[in-house]
Image: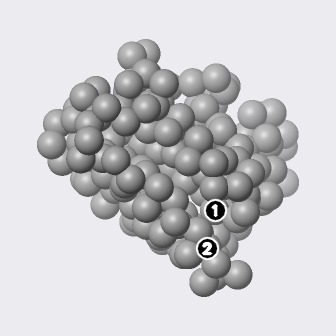
Amino acid sequence: MKFLNIVGTAREGRKSIRAARKIDNVFQDQGHETFFYDLKEKNIPPVGNRTYTDEGPVPEDIQDLREKILEADCIVLVVPEYNHSYPGILKTALDYMYPEYDEKPFAYVTVSGGGFGGVRALSHLHDVTLEYGGQPGPDLPVSNVSSTLNEDGEVIDESYEGRFESFAEDVEEFVDRRT
């Protein structure tokens, strides 16, 4: 399978990159192909011409994201919770497209510095995914991310041993049921 792992923030000092590295490695270890799409490394301007209209050219990084979405069997959003929701840059990047998400499976890894693991962001992500016509799938909330994963995405909190692998297996089963 092909998984598109989108790092949903461009903020300096972000901790969600740890979870993104971890889940990317887990999918690869399970024999899957992954695309690691880091919004921090992309030029995501405010929404202008969308991919599904004839209004004019679409930014190059959005064209790249579109191609990866179309190729992927599943989109995995790795997202921190900011102010009870998810980052605006992710919303902007996703809003450039619409028909590309039709029936596309989504999975979610949400993180927070506190004990809730980004569940409020997760709720909003489900709503938006449904609006796009996508299929909301498994989720993995990661609490206290700084003490759960190190900079390289390695688990340092024993209570998380195996959770990323179980999540990846759940995602695989979810995608299999849809194809």
* Residue farthest along the top direction in this orientation: 12
Crowd rating for badge 1 (residues with CA inside 10 Å; few <14, some 14–19, many 20+): many
Which of the numbered marks, if any, corresponds to residue 23? none
User: Can residue 113 be seen by looking at this rendering?
Assistant: yes
Name the secondary structure under disc 2.
helix
The reply, left or right, for residue 72 in relation to residue 86 is right
Please identify the quadrant where the N terminus is shown: bottom right
* Chain-order first, disc 1 or disc 2: 1
At label 2, which amino acid type do we have? Answer: Val
Residue drawn at the location 26% of the way across and 54% of the way down? 119
Give the residue type that dot 1 points to.
Cys
134 displayed left or right of 18: right
Place of residue 7 in the rendered image (x, y in percent of width and height, measured from the top left): 53, 37
**Colour theme:** one colour
Q: Please state if 105 lies on the left or on the right of 86 as rendered.
A: right
The residue at 30%/47% (across/down) is 160
Which residue is label 1 attached to?
A: 74
The residue that appears at 66% across and 47% down in the rendered structure is 28
The residue singled out by tag 2 in the image is 175
In the depicted view, which residue is nearer to us: 145 or 67?
145
- Badge 2: residue crowd in 10 Å (few <14, some 14–19, many ≥20): some
Count of number-bearing discs: 2
Of all residues, the one furthest to the left in this rendering is 115
Residue 99 lies left or right of residue 115; in this view the side is right
